[in-house]
């Protein structure tokens, strides 16, 4: 049926219940923001995201982390997401992967190094998406390094550091890993609106509060949780200062204590 400009069809060809949002939500629940997700901050850069069907564990540095809110043995993730090869991020990944069978999704060299320690892994690299039963994942750039220090002090380089974008059940989560500020963060936010951004604010090894607040401007996420501060004396970045500087940039800022959770 052709309609003239401004004219509306008297009879809708779509039955009323199909035209109703709740019908489509019921048929394709994974395409809509129906079930709330729960993100629990575990301290440092570690986080646990519980969705309707999966449990994602980010950068599980728990053993030896003075701010950890749980022990590694208490977590039963279905997937582990790892941003880079530093000890304060790799943490308990191998032990948890071996105990639970959860694959560690990470960058190529790091995945191979973890695989050699008998962890289950999925090796990826920056830029491209990889599909999974729960949705998809990609690694972004991060301005940082990725290495383990071997006996004798020589660094074993494990590829490039990364940020992680996770799309699942209609929501997008960006864990920036460790990084300096970079203006291409705009592209990450433009590609898919970010529901939750996890940004380092600690200074010394990563962005501090001022640059992290600028990152909020670039990323334009709906919510942001500051991470990677206060764990050790050099990580002096103040989450309240970050909250103050990020105010008015359009994102809800949630300063979580280790063990506290955010539903969204
Ligand atoms: Ni690092
Ligand atoms: Mn770190």
Image: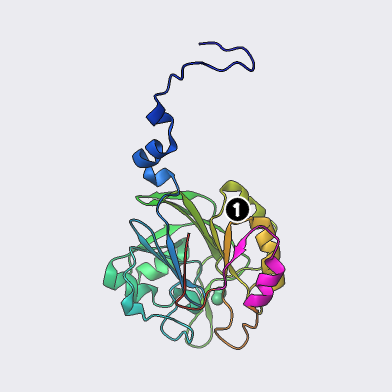
Reply above or below: 241 against 212.
Answer: below
Reply above or below: 177 against 236.
Answer: above
Question: How many other residues sit within 10 Å of disc 1, few (<14), some (14-19) or many (≥20)?
Answer: some
Of the four image quadrants, the one with ligand 1 is bottom right
Q: Residue at x 60, y 15 (%)?
A: 7
In the rendered structure, which segment of residues is drawn in magenta?
Answer: 239-255
- Its colouring scheme is rainbow
Name the spot of residue 70 as percent of width and height, x first.
Answer: 39, 80
Left or right, residue 185 beside residue 123: right
Kindly identify which residue carries mark 1. 188
Left or right, residue 189 beside residue 51: right
Residue 184, visible in the rendered structure: no
Observer-nearest residue: 155 or 184? 184
Name the spot of residue 125 as percent of width and height, x first.
Answer: 50, 56
Q: Residue at x 31, y 70 (%)?
A: 76
Name the spot of residue 33 as percent of width and height, x first.
Answer: 45, 49
Left or right, residue 231 beside residue 97: right
Name the spot of residue 11 as percent of width and height, x first.
Answer: 46, 16
Observer-nearest residue: 97 or 247? 247
Reply above or below: 211 against 149.
Answer: above
Reply above or below: 240 against 132.
Answer: below
Residue 122, visible in the rendered structure: yes
Which element carries disc 1, helix, strand or loop? helix
């Amino acid at each position: 049926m052709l309609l003239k400009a401004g004219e509306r069809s008297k009879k809708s060809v779509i039955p009323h219940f199909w035209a109703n949002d709740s019908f489509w939500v019921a048929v394709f629940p994974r395409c809509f923001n129906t079930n709330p997700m729960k993100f629990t901050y575990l301290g440092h850069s570690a986080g646990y995201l519980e969705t309707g069907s999966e449990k994602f564990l980010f950068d599980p540095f728990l053993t030896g982390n003075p701010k950890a809110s749980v022990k590694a043995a208490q977590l039963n993730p279905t997937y582990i997401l790892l941003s880079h090869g530093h000890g304060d991020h790799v943490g308990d990944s191998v032990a948890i992967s071996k105990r639970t069978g959860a694959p560690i999704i990470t960058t190529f060299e790091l995945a191979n190094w973890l695989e050699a320690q008998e962890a289950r892994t999925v090796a990826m690299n920056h830029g491209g998406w990889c599909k999974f039963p729960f949705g998809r994942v990609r690694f972004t750039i991060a301005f940082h390094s990725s290495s383990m220090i071997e006996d004798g002090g020589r660094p074993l380089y494990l590829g490039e550091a990364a940020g992680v974008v996770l799309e699942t059940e209609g929501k997008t989560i960006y864990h920036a890993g460790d990084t300096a500020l970079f203006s291409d963060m705009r592209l990450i936010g433009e590609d898919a609106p970010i529901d939750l951004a996890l940004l380092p604010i600690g200074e010394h090894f990563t962005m501090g509060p001022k640059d992290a607040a600028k990152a909020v401007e670039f990323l334009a996420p709906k919510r942001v949780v500051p991470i990677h501060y206060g764990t050790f004396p050099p990580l002096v970045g103040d989450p309240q200062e970050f909250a103050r500087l990020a105010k008015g940039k359009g994102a809800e800022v949630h300063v979580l204590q280790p063990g506290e959770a955010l539903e969204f």
